[in-house]
Structure formats: C-alpha cells, structure tokens
Image: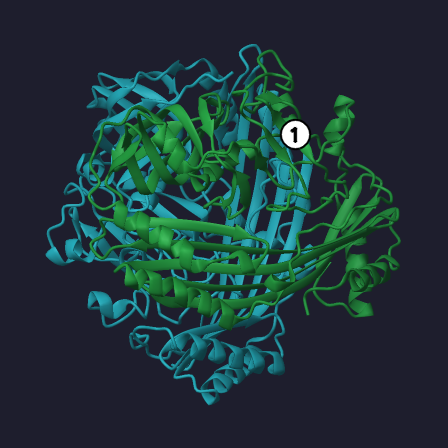
Chain colours: A green, B cyan
C-alpha cells in the first residue's frame, strides 16, 4: 500500500529521524497510486497501474546539505539512508543560500482528497472510456483520449519538530475526436479532484460537436482580431505568466516583472482593472495543499488585484536578502471572472474569432513574455453576434501581459487544465481585443 | 502544483521511482546477467502459462547524475538510481503491461500475471488483434555505447571545478548571471522475449550546458546566450576538447568534443553584443542555418511527422498527427523538399543519442532513407506497425524511458545528409545577397500536423551582398514545412557535418522522454519569412 495514513506516516518518519546525527535533519515521505487508460482510433491502446512509496532524507551540517532517498522501510534501510545523507552532506560544497529549517507549525487539513477517486478500478476506467468511444462512433468520428486518476500523499518531519501531512486525489481526462478525412477536429479537457464529477459522455459530445463544426474551414487574413478564448485556451496561454510571479527573477532583472533601472513591479498597474489572480487552498473547485515543501503555510493570497501586482513570491533566502517576509509561491491559481457565458460573449461581438484551444505554446521573449503557438480544434469567425463559419487555424505571437491589458469581458470561471503541464487552473473564458495572429496553418 | 513559482531550477526528468544514491553506488555493477536471465525466464514463463501468446521483459537499472550550478554556487548535486522490471504481453490479441520494482521471482511472476490480466481486460474493447512483425531470437547478445570514460567515474569535484571555472569566466567577462550543468545518464537494460532473445545493453549519454545572461539595467532589457554544446551518446571524453573537433568561423562550434571554457567566453562576448545589436527588419530573407540550429528544425519538421504512430492517429490526443499521410507516401512522388533534401533515419551513428545495438522490443538496429532527393520514401515503424507500410521487419524504433513505462514508437536519429559536392560555409555565404546566418537553437513551435512552424535561435548575423555585416536580434522565422524544404538550395559538404540533439523529447500519455540526435551541415533556405519579436509591456 503506497498511501499511508497521517499516523502511519508520522510513525515511520519519527523512526527514520531517530537515526539522525546531523545538526539539522528533515525526513519526508511521498507515495502515489496512479491508474491510466489511453485510447486512439476508437480502441484502447495502453493502460497501466503504478504505485510508489519513497522516503527522502536531507541532513545538514552548517551550510552543507546532503540528500538521499530509499524505497525500503525496514530499520536497517532507514538507518542506511540517514547515514548516506550525512555522508553526502560532509562531501557537499557549502551552500551560501542555506536556510535553517522551520520549527513546528499548525497546518489546517486540506480538502484535496476525495475517497471516490481513491476507489477507482481498471473496470470503471474502461467503462468511462467505453462511453466516450461510443459517442465518437455515433458521430462517425475517430476518438483518441486519455484518462488518468491518482491518489498521493506527502509528509515531512524535521529535527525542529515541524510535521505536516497531506493527501490528495486528481483526475485528468482529455479527448480529441477527428473525422476520417482529417478535415475536422474537436477537443475537450476536464480536471477534478472527485472522479464522480467526470462525465466522459458529455465531454466527448463537446469534442464531437467541435469536430463536426470545424469541417470546411475557410482561410481569412491573419492580423489583429478580437478573440473569445475558451477556458482551456486561457489556462494554457496564462500558464507562463503564472510561473513567472517570482520576486528574485524580477529583482535580478530577467523577468517581465523586472523594472527598468532595477527592482520589480510590485504595486504597479500592469494589467486591466478587471484582472484579479489569486491562490486559495480552500477553493472548493480547485483546492490545494495547505503547506509547501519548505514547510510554509499556504494561505489565500492575491497576486494581481484589479490589474495591480500585489504579491510576488519570495523564497526564504531571497526574503532575508531583501528584508521582507517570505511569500511562498502559489499552490493553485484562480482568476476571477464575470457571469457571462461564452454564448453571451459571442452575442455581444461585432467581429471576432472564437478560439476553442491553443497548441504548442513556447516562449519567444521572456522579457515581454511574448509567446507563440497556434489555434486548433475549432476556430470560428464571429460576425454581428453569431458564429458564421469555421476558419483555418492561425499562428499567434502574443504576450499574456499585453492580452490582459486588452481584456473586454471576462466570463464565468471554470476549472480547466493546461494541455501542456496537465495542471488544473480555475479561469474564466475571456474576450480580448487586438490579439495578434501572424500566419495561417493548414493543420486540422 | 506545489512548489510552483519557487524558482527557475529546472531539474532533469528522472525515471520513475528514482532514489538518490551515493556516487560510489553508481559504480557498483548491478545484478549479474545470469540472475537477470533467470528472472526474465520466470516472467516469460508466467506470462505464457497465464495465456500470453507473446511476452517481453525489461529489467532496467537507470542511473542519472546531475550537477547544477549558478554563479559561484552549486545548486544541486545528485546521483539517482531506478531499478525494476517491466513486462509486456499479448493475450487475446491485445497488449497488456505491468511493472514493479520488486525484482524477485515472486514479484516478477505476480507482475507478469497482472500484465496478462490487463491485456485480457483491454481485449474486450479492441477492434483488431495486434499484428507483430516476425522477429528472430538472437540468443544471448550484448551492446555497449563505445565510451572512453564513464561520466559516473569522474569525481564530482572535477565536474564542480569545471563548472565553477565556466561560471567564473562568464562573470569575469561581464555577464550578470550564469547557470551551468552537467547531466549524465546510464541505462543498463536487459531485454528478453518469447522470441528467444536475451539482450544486455549499457547505454551512456552526457549533456554539459550553460546559459549566460547579461542585463542592461537602465533599459530593463536582458539578453541570454546558451551553450553551443550538444547532448551526446558519449562518455566524459566529450568534455576533452581536441583541435580537430572545432569548427572555426564567426564563432567556434563543436563536433564530437566540446570546449566548454572556450564556448562560455564566446557566449559572454556574444551576449554583450546582443544587447546593442540591431533589431531585425521583418521580411523575406535567405537563411543560412548552422547545424547547431538546424537540428531542431529537422527534429520538429521532419523527424516528428515521419513517425508512423502520428500518421496513423495514435498520438492525436497528445503529440499530434502528421501531414505526411499514407497516400502521400504511397504516391511515390510527394515532393517534400528540393533534390538536396536527403533525410536518413539511423540508430547506429557513433556519438549519437539514439545509438543502440537493439531497440526495446529486441530488434537489431540499422539505418534507412526517409526522404530521397526530396521525395518521401519511408516512415519510422515498430513491430506492430510494420505490416501497415508493407514491411516484413520492424525498423527498430521502439523505446521506453524506463522499466516502469511501456515501450512504444520513438524516433531514431533523423539527419539531413551532407551535400555531395564540395561546398564550404564561406562558399554558401558569399552567394547570399540579403540573408541571416543563424547559430544555435532557440524558441520553437509547430502545429499538430507539422505544417506551420516558427523558430528562433541563439545568435543572428545579417548577410549583405555575400558578407556578414553585423549582429541582429529579435529574429524568428515562420514557414510552411513543404515550402521551406523546397527552398533548400545549398547544403555544405561532409566537412561541416555535425550532430545536435534533444535530451528530453516528449511523447505519449503518460508522457515519456527520449533522447535523439539530428545531424546536418550548414544549409541555405531561400526567401523565408522573418518576423520581429520585440514587444513593449507596461
């Protein structure tokens, strides 16, 4: 069994720590049970179940630290891994950025774990996929999809008495449906903590509707357009911005958060006043852990508030250099939205493009966060409040910072996943003006 | 998602279940071959008695070492080991796979039974049974990357010392920041199958690299220049420079040996020059692409679309499909590129990341043409795909990143053959009226069928009337795949041929990474659309 209870984890960690002779020692446990099933061409291609449990030890003497890990838990193995980390610490170079361990703290229990997800079996997975394949066959399309569910836990204990435990579940489902001729493609992605919320039938219906609706795409000129981005496109587009909310990179002058002349942009109005981005471990739709690997408490925190940079993360070392309080990085990302549906946003659009999904986004220039990528799986031309016809896919070159300055309307937030990292975010669909498409692609 | 935003330390992707070990442990031999054979036979027999019509087993020990530094400090050092067994079977016409790190007779028998159970469960929803290309058993054979010195045998202190010298040179030269690293991989893998093969292989890879940053505080702008090293299928000897491995010119580039100290000095000079370089005027240019850059364009625009699983739709939900549909190949006259476009697939090339004796389903490796004089002639296939393109045998393109992952079709080394006629880089440049010479790989993006791509680079030089006249910045080129390859008008000869490569190429769900090299000589592409990537925020 790879998933230990809080009590089991604490007992094992205490035993491991009892072997420590270092000045400071931190022991940690991680365990996971993952199940997955993959399908393509309307048939299952691969499936797997995998579990893992491992214990890591970090021992420090002064500013020298050594790490070691092991997946055997008898007394002899525990002692061996502690000794190894101590030996490696003695050999390690001094780390001038070493920070002492934190002492005991109280962390509230997170709401990330859902029993129904932990109870998943290969049969339930196959049944969910069977439903999806049937929808695709009924729509005369070819389905390729992937369903993965996981339960994992992590626990840490250190020689100063800090103990923390967290258990969570996660489900990711993605589905692509295409027609035989290769002229239509549709996609849907879902992320949940609770597997009972996953409806592969409805998600596949959305993908098949997009696929059949995207057939017969016309070429229109690339250029600047008002676009409506669906949540799965927004999540992927904004992910690089979410990763970049760090003070050190900004202070060092190598981030879009750097200020000309030195320092960072904390307190500056960098985006449209409609933009508020925050983290909250207790968000019911997208919960996160209440502590991080450094043993810091994770609390609700605004990063961007009404377009103003409100917080950047400060590691404990960087905070000590800058004489500020440490700010742990985000455990989840939530962007506030409005109440409008995508349909309502289309209705109020005189001329624009509906973007269902984005693809292969890469950083072109980190100082402006300029990104390039392409649209796919349903790109539609809107005129006078209506979708007129599907259009050929575009390559874009756009910065999410510029994009969040050009926000017209934010819709109702929805949990979605980044199609690259498979991380979940809670983000609204959005209408933005002057989104820059630079060329056309024949890709479907 | 925990830890997001906690810094820019990019650790290499490690095999599943990796544990951190003492560097000395990496040098201890793993399980002996006779024991592996016994355990493999237990797996094969258990699978067969459970009802499998075919089975293969991979007992793998995967060692990684990384030393990661910035400026004057070591950020991370670790040796990791992952040891376990993966068993793949066909039962009732369907694949099944299971893996365990319990490498005991009991653990293996149980895992084989699990793989058979998975196959039987999946068999209920397959449309057609797996069709495996026949494969002869080789008996007991082996293969080793021909290294001169294992990176794992070189003391950590020596690596730290080299990286500190590299960082010191950058800071002394006026750089504000430098990140540097040495990553080493050793795959010790044992394969056995019901076809009668028992294959023991020892694969080595190494990747030294750095990134130099210079800040212009007043303007708030910064520029970076990455190393012109390449990840290679070699030992630590890659880091012992030789004069004959250097390619001189606008900046020194490297063949099969790398001078990290020399390159960092050049990078530090480059990055200062980039700050004041002229911002590119968008428009059509003739591009002269160095192999340190062109490898990535080949990787994305030729190597990926010729993967047969993409062509067939197996990657439709993740890595994408391909514009190179079977009808284009069948026609025998699909003009992918100009007559100079000769693309070879190769699993043997010395020093390459893809070089192995046998693939991960027990097929002896070789080489073949993908594109001949501009015409698409073949794909990359594995045993259960060979029949689809009329092949009697697999091309040996099967790979799994670890014992815990199921093996599937991964690209071999895919390279542009050098030009047959004698042609130097200087000869190419002197004929270009309005062009850009690009060194090093940068930003990259391509659509899911591999039609439309955009690439950046590390350094860009403006060519006017046959002369290099200065450095440019903010350069990216956008092109349509087939048009781009048809605009290939010159390829330097084999004297300029070099490998570039990807240490972690992703594909599959769950995602797996693969290491692969791409060779080329400097090449000229005419009339490519160049955009200016400079923007203003705030």
Left or right? Give the position of B122 relative to B328: right
Left or right? Give the position of B442 relative to B235: left
Residue closer to the observer: A392 or A193? A193
Residue extending farthest to the bottom is: B49
Position of the N terminus of chain B by quadrant: top right
Which quadrant of the figure has residue B534?
top left
Q: Residue at x 41, y 50 (%)?
A: A188
Task: Return the x and y of residue A132 as percentages of the image width and height.
Answer: 39, 62
Give the structural element (helix, strand or loop) at label 1: strand
Q: Residue at x 56, y 32 (%)?
A: A336
Crowd around label 1: few <14 · some 14–19 · many ≥20 (10 Å): many
Answer whether residue B251 is visible to the viewer in this image.
no
Q: Is residue B464 above or below residue B428?
A: above
Name the subunit of mark 1: A
Q: Is residue B329 above or below residue A408?
A: below
Residue closer to the observer: A244 or A96? A244
Task: Return the x and y of residue B376 as percentages of the image width and height.
Answer: 18, 52
Residue closer to the observer: A199 or B134? A199
Q: Which residue is mark 1?
A: A302
Residue closer to the observer: B196 or A243? A243
């Amino acid at each position: 069994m790879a998933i230990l209870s809080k009590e089991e984890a604490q007992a094992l960690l205490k035993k491991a720590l009892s072997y420590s002779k270092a000045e400071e020692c931190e022991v940690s446990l991680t365990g996971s049970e993952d199940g997955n099933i993959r399908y393509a061409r309307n048939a299952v291609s691969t499936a797997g179940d995998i579990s893992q449990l491992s214990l890591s030890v970090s021992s420090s003497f002064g500013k020298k630290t050594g790490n070691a890990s092991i997946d055997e838990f008898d007394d002899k193995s525990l002692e061996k891994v502690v000794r190894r980390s101590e030996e490696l610490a003695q050999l390690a170079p001094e780390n001038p950025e070493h920070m002492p361990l934190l002492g005991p703290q109280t962390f509230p229990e997170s709401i990330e774990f859902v029993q129904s997800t932990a109870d998943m079996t290969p049969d339930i997975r196959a049944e969910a996929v069977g439903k999806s394949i049937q929808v695709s066959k009924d729509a005369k399309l070819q389905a390729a999809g992937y369903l993965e569910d996981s339960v994992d836990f992590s626990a840490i204990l250190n020689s100063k008495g800090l103990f923390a435990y967290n258990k969570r579940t996660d489900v990711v489902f993605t589905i692509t449906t295409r027609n035989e001729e290769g002229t239509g493609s549709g996609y849907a992605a879902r992320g949940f903590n609770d597997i009972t919320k996953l409806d592969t039938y409805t998600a596949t219906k959305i993908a098949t509707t997009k696929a059949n609706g995207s057939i017969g795409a016309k070429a229109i000129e690339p250029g600047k357009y008002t676009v409506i981005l669906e949540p799965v496109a927004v999540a992927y587009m904004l992910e690089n911005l979410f990763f970049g909310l760090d003070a050190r990179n900004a202070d060092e002058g190598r981030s879009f958060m750097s200020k000309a002349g030195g320092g960072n942009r904390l307190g500056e109005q960098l985006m449209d006043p409609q933009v508020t981005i925050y983290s909250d471990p207790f968000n019911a739709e997208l919960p996160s852990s209440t502590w991080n690997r450094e043993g810091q408490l994770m609390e609700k925190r605004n990063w961007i508030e009404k377009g103003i940079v409100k917080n950047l993360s400060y590691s404990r070392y960087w905070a000590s250099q800058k004489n500020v309080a440490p700010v742990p990085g985000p455990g989840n990302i939530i962007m506030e939205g409005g109440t409008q549906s995508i349909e309502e946003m289309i209705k109020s659009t005189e001329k624009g493009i509906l973007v269902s999904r984005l693809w292969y986004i890469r950083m072109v220039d980190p100082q402006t966060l300029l990104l390039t990528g392409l649209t796919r799986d349903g790109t539609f031309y809107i005129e006078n409040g209506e979708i007129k016809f599907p259009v050929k896919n575009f390559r874009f070159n756009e910065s999410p910072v510029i994009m969040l300055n050009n926000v017209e309307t934010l819709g109702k937030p929805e949990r979605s996943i980044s199609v690259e990292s498979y991380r979940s975010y809670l983000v609204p669909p959005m209408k933005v003006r002057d989104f820059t498409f630079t060329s056309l692609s024949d890709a479907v | 998602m925990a830890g997001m935003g906690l810094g820019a330390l990019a650790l290499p992707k490690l095999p599943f279940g990796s544990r951190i070990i003492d560097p000395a442990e990496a040098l201890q031999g793993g399980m002996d071959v006779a024991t592996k054979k016994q355990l493999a036979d237990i797996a094969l027999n258990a699978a067969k008695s459970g009802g499998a019509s075919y089975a293969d087993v991979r007992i793998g020990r995967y060692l990684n070492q990384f030393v990661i530094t910035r400026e004057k400090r070591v950020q991370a050092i670790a040796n990791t080991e992952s040891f376990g067994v993966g068993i793949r079977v066909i039962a009732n016409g369907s694949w099944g796979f299971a893996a365990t790190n319990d490498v005991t007779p009991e653990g293996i028998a149980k895992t084989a039974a699990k793989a058979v159970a998975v196959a039987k469960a999946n068999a209920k929803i397959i449309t057609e049974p797996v069709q495996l290309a026949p494969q002869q058993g080789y008996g007991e054979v082996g293969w080793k990357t021909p290294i001169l010195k294992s990176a794992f045998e070189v003391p950590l202190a020596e690596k730290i010392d080299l990286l500190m010298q590299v960082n010191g040179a950058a800071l002394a030269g006026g750089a504000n920041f430098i990140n540097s690293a040495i990553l080493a991989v050793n795959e010790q893998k044992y394969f056995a199958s019901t076809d009668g093969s028992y294959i023991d292989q020892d694969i080595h890879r190494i990747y030294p690299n750095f990134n130099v940053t210079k800040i212009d505080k007043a303007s708030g702008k910064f520029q970076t220049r990455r190393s012109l090293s390449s990840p290679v299928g070699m030992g630590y000897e890659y880091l012992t420079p030789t004069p004959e491995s250097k390619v001189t010119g606008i900046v020194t580039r490297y063949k099969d040996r790398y001078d990290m100290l020399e390159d960092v000095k050049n990078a530090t000079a480059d990055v200062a020059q980039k700050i004041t370089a002229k911002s590119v005027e968008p428009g059509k240019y003739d591009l002269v692409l160095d192999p340190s850059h062109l490898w990535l364009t080949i990787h994305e625009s030729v190597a990926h679309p010729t993967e047969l699983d993409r062509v067939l739709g197996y990657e439709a939900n993740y890595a994408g499909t391909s514009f190179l549909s079977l009808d284009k190949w069948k026609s025998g006259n699909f003009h992918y590129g100009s007559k100079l476009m000769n693309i070879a697939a190769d699993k043997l090339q010395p020093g390459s990341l893809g070089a192995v004796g046998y693939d991960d389903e027990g097929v002896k490796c070789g080489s073949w043409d993908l594109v001949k004089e501009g015409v698409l002639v073949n794909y990359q296939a594995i045993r259960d795909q060979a029949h689809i393109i009329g092949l009697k045998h697999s091309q040996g393109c099967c790979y799994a990143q670890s014992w815990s992952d199921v093996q599937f079709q991964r690209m071999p080394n895919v390279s542009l053959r050098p030009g047959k006629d004698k042609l130097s880089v200087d000869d190419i440049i002197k004929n270009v009226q309005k062009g850009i010479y690009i060194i090093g790989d940068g930003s990259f993006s391509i659509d899911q069928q591999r039609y439309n791509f955009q690439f950046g680079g590390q350094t860009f030089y403006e060519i006017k009337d046959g002369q290099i006249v200065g450095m440019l910045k903010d350069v990216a080129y956008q092109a349509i795949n087939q048009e781009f390859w048809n605009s290939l008008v010159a390829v330097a000869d084999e004297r300029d041929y070099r490998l570039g490569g990807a240490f972690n190429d992703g594909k599959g769900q769950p995602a797996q990474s693969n290491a692969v090299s791409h060779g080329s000589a400097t090449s000229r592409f005419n009339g490519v659309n160049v955009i200016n990537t400079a923007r203003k925020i705030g």
